Image: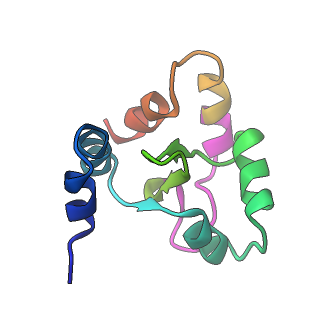
Amino acid sequence: MERPEARLEAMGESGTAELVWRRHLGALLSTKQVRELMRIGSRQAISERVKRRRLLAVPASDGRPQFPAFQFTQAGRPLPGLHLILEQFAGAVATPFTTASWFVT
């Protein structure tokens, strides 16, 4: 079975950057995985939560959103107070990666 990182390593520079972030942030979930975890039926509902700063998404090298797993409880809900922290970062940081990095440092 191929390691998930092997695909990123094969992508060159953009894959290398994504691999570094993945190692720094930990597990990153796809929209589908978040939908299943939160028991939400549509991609749009997840996207709306990101827009309203209720979930944190970081872009993959292909532009698709990825969701750091650290923001979810064991029950699949966003961490209590997550939205308050995301609101504080709104407009104050250059990228979602900066916000995500704050959580893990």
**74 to the left or right of 85:** left
Vertical relation: 27 (above or below) 80? below
Query: What secondary structure do most residues of the magenta stretch adopt?
Result: loop
Vertical relation: 43 (above or below) 97? below
- Front residue of 14/58: it is 14
Pick out the residue farthest to the front.
11
Residue located 52% across and 33% down the image: 96
Pick out the residue farthest to the bottom.
1
Residue located 44% across and 34% down the image: 97
- Front residue of 80/32: it is 32
Residue located 51% across and 26% down the image: 95
- Front residue of 16/88: it is 16
**15 to the left or right of 91:** left
The quarter of the rendered structure image containing the C terminus is top left
Q: Position of residue 78 (x, y in %)?
A: 62, 57
**65 to the left or right of 61:** right
Q: Is residue 72 magenta?
A: yes
Q: Is residue 46 magenta?
A: no
Q: Is residue 76 visible?
A: no
Where is residue 45, by image quadrant?
bottom right
The quarter of the rendered structure image containing the N terminus is bottom left
Q: Position of residue 74 (x, y in %)?
A: 51, 72
Q: Is residue 94 visible?
A: yes
**99 to the left or right of 2:** right
Residue located 79% across and 49% down the image: 48
Vertical relation: 37 (above or below) 27? below
For the image, the number of numbered tags is: 0
Magenta stretch? Answer: 71-85
